[in-house]
Image (cartoon, rainbow, N blue to C red):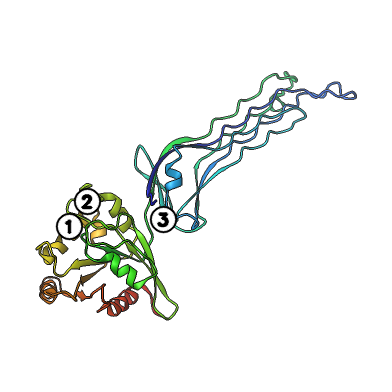
Amino acid sequence: MFVDEARVHVRGGRGGDGAVAFLREKFRPKGGPSGGDGGKGGDVVFVASNATRTLVDLSRQKRIAADDGRPGSGRNRAGRGGDDRVVRVPPGTAIKDADTEDVLWDLLREGERAVVARGGRGGRGNQHFATPTNQAPRIAEDGRRGESRELVVELKLIADAGLVGLPNAGKSTLLSRVSAARPKIADYPFTTREPMLGIVSSGDYTEIVIADLPGLIEGASAGAGLGHEFLRHVERTRLIVHMVDSCPTDGSDPVENVGVIRAELGGYSAELAGRPEVLVANKADLPGAADGVARLREAYGNVFSISAATGEGVKELLAELFARLVPRG
């Protein structure tokens, strides 16, 4: 199951209490205070790991807490620190404050870490409170509470190119043709319910990652359909591959359909609307496709005409993607 958002409460461990103790040895009758310090509470740490690809495990945990520190003891012995709680998340995970929606951390690469809730400091034992006028203090500090906060964790897939378009534009078929990915393909809208990544090789040891993203509908930028769940993943892509059905069976206008998708991208983010785009007219093998391609080129200029089903024009499209995404020395 692909899960790309989770809400969780995190709490750092409480620091251990300082101890009240006095040194009592046969040959040191005035040994003095010997209460040790409490141990520090553990931290809650999120780590980006390629070993996980969704937030499904995190979504099942409503509360995550690190271990508390242990109290100090006599003979100036400090308590053991609490163990950190390490949570693995996929690269591309953004961690936001649930109240303000501010992005606090953005874990993009394998191994990047974020301490999302620090453990509390351990309390000082009575050894720290001796003074010339009070050489036998009977006070010690309590351990401090750890940090506590509510977080929203979002996964935004990292890909070189993202396939966007209305449902049934042929995005999944194209991905299955150019990579080893095997997305679900069927002749009805919203076949793709979750993003899927495919790695495409050029033959000269270079690769790009292409994401097949769920189909958009009009109103998606306002939350309709898969809405923001889809658009979140487009943000990480360097290049938008905008696929359009050149001869829609529903009688819609392919030129207008391009405008619908562009409007939704712009409604979500002005920066996203300005992202580099390759416009692809699919289903060139069907009757009536040539007319649709001609109208698209008249309206938008350079348009790649392909058939994801037969492979027609796909080689030329991939050459364009590699030219744009892979720098040449």
| Residue at the spot of label 1 | 263
| Residue at the spot of label 2 | 221
Measure the C-alpha gap from mark 2 to mark 3.
Answer: 21 Å
Q: Position of residue 292 (x, y in %)?
A: 12, 72
Q: Amino acid at mark 1?
A: Ala
Nearer to us in this view, 40 or 293: 293
| Residue at 11% from the left image edge and 74% from the top image edge | 288
| Residue at the spot of label 3 | 92
User: Which quadrant of the figure has residue 233?
Assistant: bottom left
Apparent side of residue 143 relative to residue 104 in the rendered image (left or right): right
User: Which quadrant of the figure has residue 30?
Assistant: top right
Measure the C-alpha gap from mark 2 to mark 1.
Answer: 9 Å
Nearer to us in this view, 84 or 33: 84
Apparent side of residue 66 relative to residue 324 in the rendered image (left or right): right
Residue farthest right in this picture: 27
Q: Secondary structure at mark 3?
A: loop
User: Eyeballing the image, is 207 above or below 129?
Assistant: below
Question: Does label 3 or label 1 sit earlier along the sequence?
Answer: 3
CB contact under 8 Å: marks 3 and 1: no
Question: Does label 2 or label 3 sit earlier along the sequence?
Answer: 3
Apparent side of residue 167 relative to residue 247 in the rendered image (left or right): right
Within-10-Å neighbours for mark 1: few <14, some 14–19, many 20+: some
Q: Amino acid at mark 3?
A: Gly
| Residue at 69% from the left image edge and 29% from the top image edge | 72
Residue 193, disc = none
User: Eyeballing the image, is 265 above or below 171?
Assistant: above
Q: Position of residue 142 (x, y in %)?
A: 61, 25
